Every structure is written in C-alpha cells, then in structure tokens.
Image (cartoon, rainbow, N blue to C red):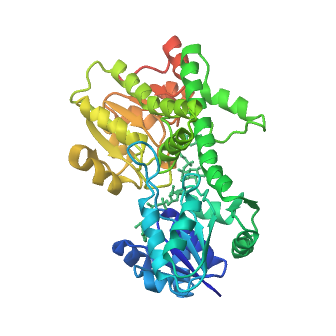
Amino acid sequence: MKKITVVGTGYVGLVTGVALAEIGHHVVCLDKDVEKVELMCSGISPIYEAGLEGYLAHHLRTERLEFTTDPAVAIDGAELVFIAVGTPELADGSADLSYLREACMTVAEYLSGPATIVIKSTVPVGTNDLIEQLINEHALYPISVVSNPEFLREGQALYDTFQAERIVIGSENKATGELLQEVYAPLARPVFHTDRRSAELIKYASNAFLATKISFINEMAALCDQLGANVDDVAWGMGMDTRIGHSFLKAGAGYGGSCFPKDTKALVQIAKEVEHDFQLMKAVIDINDFQRHRILKWMKDHYTNMRGLRIAVLGLSFKPNTDDIREAPSLKLIEALIECGADVVAYDPAAIPNAKEVLAERICYAYSVEEAIEKADGCLIMTEWNEIKETPIEVYHYLMEHAVVFDGRNCYSLEDAKRAGVMYYSVGRNYASRRSGDGVKGKD
Ligand SMILES: NC(=O)C1=CN([C@@H]2O[C@H](COP(=O)(O)OP(=O)(O)OC[C@H]3O[C@@H](n4cnc5c(N)ncnc54)[C@H](O)[C@@H]3O)[C@@H](O)[C@H]2O)C=CC1
Ligand SMILES: O=C(O)[C@H]1O[C@H](OP(=O)(O)OP(=O)(O)OC[C@H]2O[C@@H](n3ccc(=O)[nH]c3=O)[C@H](O)[C@@H]2O)[C@H](O)[C@@H](O)[C@@H]1O
C-alpha cells in the first residue's frame, strides 16, 4: 500500500481522501486549518454529507486515513500527491490561484523523492503546465503533473465518486496517466484520457453547460409567464427527448453554490485572455442574476410597502441537502427584503449556523417551517428541501396572517395552492393564476 497525500480537505479533498481509503489506499490528508483537522481526527466531518462520517470513522480505525497540519508528515515519502485547495473568484471574475501556488510550494519543499502531482482543483487552462514548471523549479526531485478535475455534487458527493460517470485524466505522458488510472482501478468507473489543457477545459465546459441549461429554462419561465404556458410542463415535454434530457431544466430562483457562479465567470475571463468574447456565457450569468430580481418584483408589486411586514423565508442553502450557503440566491433576496424594511424570519433544516455568520442578528431564525410562517404576512421559498416541499400547503393557509406564498422553487402544484386558498406566485406559472383570478386569494 503506497502512501497517497491529499492537500486541502474541503469538500473535494475530504471526499477524495475517504474514497481513496475505501478502495484500499493509505491516505494522509493535509490541511492548514487546525480546527478542521482536529474535527476530522476525531471522526467528525466538517462538511454536511450523508454517510460521510461513517466512512471517516471506519477508515480512521483501519488506519488507512490520517489527517495532519504538518506538511512533513503528509508529504515526506509520498509518490502521489493530490491537490484540492480552493480556487475562489477574484474581483474581475478570474480564478484566484494563490492557495494553489502556496500548496505547490509546500509540496516542492517537502517532497523526498520523484512524484506525480494530481490537480483536482478547478483551474484555468494552462495552469497545470505552470504548476509543473513551478514545482520542478523548486523541488529537489523531478515531478509530473496530471489534471484530474472533479465532478462531484455537494450533498451526493460519495455517490458521485463511487458511481462516477467519468474520470477525466489529462496528462502529457502515457505513464503518468496510466499510473492514476491504476489508482482508481478498484472503482471500476469509465476513464477518459486526454491532454492536460483539454482536461482543464472539460471541467469548465461541463459546469458552464449545466448553468446554460438552467438559465435557458429560467428565460423560458419568463416567457411562460407572459404567454400563458407552464414552465414545468414545457421542461418535461422538452426533456422527454433523450437528446435534451430532463436534468438541469428545473426553473427557479437561479443557480448558486461555490462553483457554478465562479466557474461561469472564470470561463468568461479565460476566453477574454485569448480575445474571445464569450457572449453566450455572459448571457447565462446575466439571466441568473436577473432571476432574483424577478422574484423581488413579484413581492414589490404585491405589497406596495414591505416596511414592518413579517416575511418568512424557507430555505437558505443554495440547494437542498447541504448546509452550504455560498452564493445562495436566498442571501441576496434577504438583503433586498431587509432593505425594503421587511422583518425576515428564516428557516433552513441545516444552514442556519452558516447563515448566522453572514446575516447575524439582522434577521430572526426559526426552528421549523411552522414557526417561521406563523403569523407571517408573506412566505418566500428559496430551497426545495423535502421538509419544505412536504409541508401541506393548507398549513400556510392556517398559520399565516396573510397566506401569500412566493415560491422560488415551484414546490407546489397550482391546483393545490388554489384549493387551499393560498395566494401563490411561482416561477414560469404565474400567467394562469393572474388570468383566472383563481388560486390567488389570500386569507382575507
Ligand atoms: N465543492 C465542490 O462541490 C466542488 C469543488 N470543486 C473544485 O475543487 C476545488 C476545491 O473546492 P472545495 O473542496 O470546495 O474547497 P474549500 O475551499 O472548501 O476547501 C479547501 C481546503 O484547502 C485548505 N487549504 C488551502 N490552502 C492550503 C494549503 N496551502 N495547504 C493545506 N491546505 C490548504 C483550506 O484550509 C480548505 O480546508 C476548487 O477548485 C473547486 O472549484 C470541484 C468540484 C466540486
Ligand atoms: O464544480 C462543482 O463544484 C460542481 O458544481 C455542481 O454541483 P453543485 O454546485 O454541488 O450543485 P448542483 O446540484 O449542480 O446545483 C447547482 C445550482 O443549480 C441549481 N439548479 C440545479 C438544477 C436545476 O435544474 N435547476 C437549478 O436551479 C441548484 O438549485 C443549485 O443552486 C455540478 O453539478 C457538479 O458536477 C460540479 O462538480
């Protein structure tokens, strides 16, 4: 069992470390965040991912998985080093490579023999070439760099790893590519070999394409509102064509998270550097930003003045089954509601601790759907958690002061809203209710 090092244990690094241990490797994970490392050493996952702690505890016991803040312990003797540090967004939208550079310098300093460096972080095209140059300039031993972008989704990261639809390996020589393929062999998943630059671009192209599908359907939703169609039916009818497919055609409040917003902007910058004006991507980003303005407009048009109104916000995380609020559309809408003078009371099954770090005491927090909506003048749904979707719509009618629901994730059917006497706004389905005047009556 050869030692494998993973540098950076955020979502990607931790799941990679656990998966590599599960398929039989000895993995040492290095992170500079002392608190995080202490948590992981005691079997606690710093990220919200069902099932992860079970694997973590198991492999701490099998001793196939270790965590340390000491680069000497992590890197000395390693022949394979995975790097999975963050590549956040800079002010101009391009990727900040400073964490990556620092990690590479640490690796160069502590390597004790020739090694292969595997870059899992999402990086602009050409970065792997620069890293190879940088580490070789500073290390005492020769190294090769392989690009191995990550495609996992938060909340189902283990599934996406063990059932990966593809493992992309970008290398400049056959031997290093094959070495990485051997490491992953026990997963028995499809492997696609290419050159490093193509691998780097596959990652951005994949996220950008998924984001494009979302903005496309959100733009269709705006049309549906004007033309009297139902966007959920339009998406379903389109998706029945297997060339189009059903996935990523759910209209809503727009995409958020730590990757789609930053990777779409980074791709525009990558294109700009080679004097290519990526107009399609710019439109995708603009449509996504505009989505929350559409929702705010429903609210502004409904209430002439929101000052002093109690508005419940259900769902804070950028999507269900995660506590991650990075770039969550809910945050920007809440800021706008505060600006309009509303008293916001928010509920989320998992993200309240993270939200408190950002919004602090500027809003109130509830500990159930019912507590949030009780006596509220309006309710804004921002994340389609099962717990929220499964709350019968009648509950809004009974508990709210004024049963008005602004649903940014289309959690309820128009028929149910109508039957329950809830005034119901949703994405790409508003025309019908406006035209008929049905299903738009509040309690009073
Ligand atoms: N979060 C996700 O779902 C996915 C992320 N990615 C990409 O993977 C990369 C990592 O993303 P996350 O895991 O979300 O990042 P993150 O920002 O959550 O975690 C990065 C970790 O690296 C550590 N770190 C930073 N510099 C270090 C250094 N010099 N030495 C040791 N540790 C260091 C930090 O303390 C932190 O724990 C990014 O490029 C991201 O775009 C790709 C696919 C999915
Ligand atoms: O590079 C990354 O970090 C990852 O980004 C996304 O994964 P993730 O951000 O975890 O979440 P998704 O499930 O893709 O959802 C992203 C956003 O799109 C929104 N979305 C998704 C699908 C849809 O039909 N409509 C829609 O609005 C979600 O609400 C969410 O805000 C990709 O799906 C992963 O393949 C990729 O590895």
In the rendered view of the protein, which quadrant contains the C terminus? top left
Q: Residue at x 35, y 75 (%)?
A: 34
How far across and how far down the image is residue 27, in percent?
A: 56, 80
Q: Is residue 1 left or right of residue 371?
A: right
The residue at the far front in this view is: 137
Task: Say if 248 sits above or below 348 in the image.
Answer: above
Task: Say if 385 sits above or below 1 in the image.
Answer: above
To which quarter of the image does residue 17 belong? bottom right
Q: Is residue 118 left or right of residue 169?
A: left
| Number of numbered discs | 0
Q: Is residue 350 left or right of residue 83?
A: left
Residue 46 in sight: no
Task: Say if 29 sits above or below 206 in the image.
Answer: below
How far across and how far down the image is residue 235, in percent?
A: 66, 31
Task: Say if 411 sits above or below 117 in the image.
Answer: above
Q: Is residue 272 left or right of residue 102?
A: right
The one of 199 and 300 positioned closer to us in this rendering: 199
The one of 200 and 355 positioned closer to us in this rendering: 200
How far across and how far down the image is residue 335, in percent?
A: 30, 37
In the rendered view of the protein, which quadrant contains the N terminus? bottom right
Q: Residue at x 58, y 20 (%)?
A: 224
How far across and how far down the image is residue 317, in percent?
A: 43, 49
Residue 415 in sight: yes
